[in-house]
Amino acid sequence: MSAFASSAPRLISTDDGSRAAAIAAAVEALGAGRLVALPTETVYGLGADATDGTAVAGIYAAKGRPSINPLISHVPDLAAAETHGRFDADARRLAQAFWPGPLTLVVPKQPGSPISDLATAGLDSVGLRVPANAVTRAVLAGLGRPVAAPSANRSGRISPTTAADVVAELGAKVAVVVDDGPCPVGVESTIVACLGDDVRLLRPGGVSRAEIEAVLGRPLDASPSGHDADASDEVLLAPGMMTSHYAPEAAVRLDAREVRAGEALLAFGPEPIAGQDQAVAVETLSATGDLTEAAANLFGALRRLDSSGAAAIAVMPIPAEGLGEAIRDRLARAAAPRG
Ligand code: AMP
Ligand code: MG
């Protein structure tokens, strides 16, 4: 019998007298770096402290996500959002019109924001949302830190709109499930990017294009080419529209068995490899071979190696199991030739 089989998440209802206890339990678990399923008006979210890279890595592990994409960070109000993102006039107008509500705004990340690199997938933009659910907003205010939360389902499956769906999907992978009844909207948030002169729809959702255009007083700019039919979690960004994926300047060489002249090393696990002493710079994802630690360190380590000025980064083999699959996917995209 596995340890998982006998354990279950703590399912707490928000009925009558238990509301304050549910909020306190969720705040405590999030503060301890654990995963909490939270009700929103769209779907149930699988939340982690967005400033804690290890906790955010836990989201990927629990969902079994095969790739690393930026997550939406949830905050209690616009004032909190403005400490993490830079809002221009359009972004502020949209926030004032639709928050709290099913609209996510992708805006430039404030340089001082403590949101982890893993939550933004290494980008210098951040996706922010103020959800409407009162219990969840109380949790966000109580925690005092943003909560990264994609839908609380295993990768490739339908988004959960009840607490029972969450338990069926994730079981004991989530510490606490806050049961506030069925989600009223049931589709994901609309995602709008305000990253410069134009305002673009990245994903349709609970707020319609017409409602957004009415607030802007003009049509949205041309949208990205389309959506990844396979996953409601994914958004395709138009080529050249923005850096949709963090990519180092240096070439990236995967599954390296040795460090070659002029290379920096991205190390994994306890064993050194040939030529390590000659590496331009070395960063270790996890000295013990822990994939959660490796995911949490991935973007910071890549960025530091990139700024070492090395022409290439040799990456030691990372097992393609568990979170390793998502880490390898991200590194493969960093390694892909770009034009
Ligand atoms: P969800 O799985 O519902 O949390 O939605 C996450 C989606 O939000 C991702 O697939 C992203 O494309 C989008 N998103 C979040 N943050 C950003 C960002 N900084 N830049 C671009 N897209 C973002
Ligand atoms: Mg989803």
Image (tube, rainbow, N blue to C red):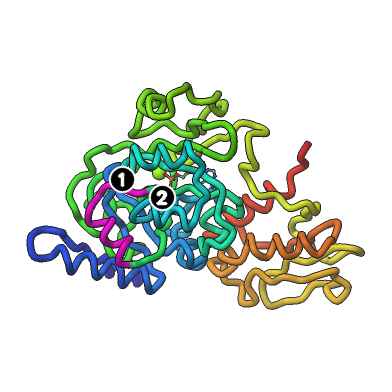
Where is residue 36 shown, x and y percent of the image? 33, 62
Would you place residue 26 above or below residue 217 in this image? Answer: below
Where is residue 277 shown, x and y percent of the image? 85, 76
Q: Which residue is mark 1?
A: 100
Callout 2, which amino acid? Pro
SS state under label 2:
loop
In which image quadrant can residue 20 be found?
A: bottom left
Distance, label 2 to label 1, CA atoms, is 17 Å
Q: Residue at x 61, y 42 (%)?
A: 244
Q: Residue at x 65, y 76 (%)?
A: 287
SS state under label 1:
loop
Q: Residue at x 52, y 38 (%)?
A: 194
State which quarter of the image contains the C terminus. top right
Q: Is mark 2 within 8 Å of ligand 1?
A: yes
Where is residue 210 shown, x and y percent of the image? 37, 23
Magenta region, residue range: 130-142
Residue situated furthest left in the rendering: 16
In which image quadrant can residue 191 be found?
A: top left
The question of residue 134 being in magenta is answered with: yes
Q: Nearer the viewer, residue 68 or 212?
A: 212
Q: Residue at x 43, y 56 (%)?
A: 148
The question of residue 317 being in magenta is answered with: no
Q: Which residue is mark 2?
A: 150
Mark earlier in primary sequence (2, 1): 1
